[in-house]
Image (cartoon, rainbow, N blue to C red):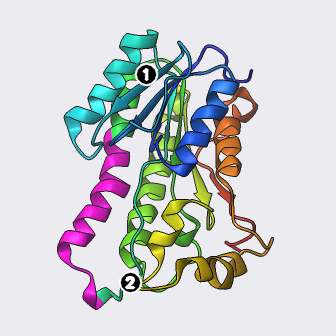
């Protein structure tokens, strides 16, 4: 029970990675506040579990998630920010400003808003923040420039926050997932592409260990980074990618 008695917000909780991460944190004894645009698919699990709907690109809604967490459990120990969207593989000349703005809002601005709200709530208390980015910031693929820019900004922001918050004993780290076996993977394919075929011929083949990353791999990494086992780990980017970044 490495997280016993601690309270964490997990965003993107209704997605493939999010659901498994919620379950792992509950297994480790944490109080979990599961947040997503819709939490209809998240059933009540126990008295140390709370669901909150919210659009985290909106300042007041991000702050409301934090407020509800504290109201329910009396304190907050950290955040695992998984919420994000993919980019359909698109040449730069075909990317619209609206598409760019949407990706930046969800993948970068929401990181800022949730991290800021959590830091305010922590005050002088120690805490942990884990932001999930993408191995594509290290090994880009064509057609994903907006997505990669949004995730790269999230990494730089996280590392800047890590050094800023170190005197307060708040740790901030990043997880870089490689190609993951979730519904989101198919959303990176170009319009009309055979997603099932691409899983084997493109995505799986790009991973040196020979298989797609599973949500449990990301969940276990998040547990480690939030636990006391990682008490001296901050500003780190942990690759959970099967070697994709090499």
Name the side, left or right, on which 52 lies relative to 140: left
Above or below: residue 184 compared with residue 226: below
| Residue 232 visible, this angle | no
Residue 122 position, x and y percent, is 43, 22
Label annotation for residue 152: none
Q: CA distance from mark 1 to mark 2?
A: 43 Å
Residue 75 placed where, x, y %? 46, 13
- Corner quadrant of residue 233: top right
Where the N terminus falls, by quadrant? top right
Looking at the rendering, the stretch of residues picked out in magenta corresponds to 93-113
**Picture quarter containing residue 219?**
top right
Q: Secondary structure at mark 2?
A: loop
Give the residue drawn at x 45%, y 18%.
124
The residue labelled by disc 1 is 122
Is residue 225 at all visible to an observer of this figure?
yes
> In the displayed structure, does residue 204 sit left or right of residue 99?
right
Q: Residue at x 46, y 74 (%)?
A: 188
Q: Quadrant of the C terminus?
A: bottom right
Residue 191 image label: 2
Q: Is residue 104 magenta?
A: yes
Query: Is residue 144 rendered magenta in the image?
Result: no
Label pair 1/2, CB-CB below 8 angstroms? no
x then y, percent, for residue 71: 36, 12
Residue toward you, 14 or 149: 14
Crowding near the residue tagged with mark 2, few <14, some 14–19, many ≥20 C-alpha atoms within 10 Å: few
Q: Secondary structure at mark 1?
A: helix
Q: Is residue 195 above or below residue 73?
A: below
Residue 111: image location, x then y, percent: 38, 47
């Amino acid at each position: 029970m490495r997280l016993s008695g601690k309270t964490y917000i997990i965003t993107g909780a209704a997605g493939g990675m999010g659901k498994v991460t919620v379950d792992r944190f509950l297994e480790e004894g944490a109080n979990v506040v599961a947040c997503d645009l819709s939490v209809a698919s998240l059933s009540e699990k126990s008295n140390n579990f709370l669901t909150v709907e919210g659009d985290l690109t909106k300042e007041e809604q991000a702050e409301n998630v934090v407020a509800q967490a504290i109201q329910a459990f009396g304190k907050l120990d950290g955040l695992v920010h998984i919420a994000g969207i993919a980019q359909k593989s698109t040449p730069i000349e075909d990317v619209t400003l609206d598409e760019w703005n949407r990706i930046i809002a969800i993948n970068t601005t929401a990181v800022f808003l949730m991290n800021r709200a959590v830091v305010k709530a922590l005050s002088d208390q120690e805490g942990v923040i884990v932001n999930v980015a993408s191995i594509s910031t290290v090994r880009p693929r064509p057609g994903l420039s907006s997505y990669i820019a949004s995730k790269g900004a999230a990494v730089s922001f996280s590392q800047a926050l890590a050094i800023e918050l170190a005197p307060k004993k708040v740790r901030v780290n990043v997880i870089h997932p490689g190609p993951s076996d979730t519904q989101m993977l198919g959303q990176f394919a170009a319009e009309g592409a055979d997603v099932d075929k691409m899983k084997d011929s493109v995505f799986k083949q790009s991973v040196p260990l020979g298989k797609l990353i599973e949500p449990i791999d990301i969940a276990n990494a998040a547990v480690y980074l939030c636990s006391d086992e990682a008490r001296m780990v901050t500003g780190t980017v942990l690759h959970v990618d099967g070697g994709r970044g090499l």
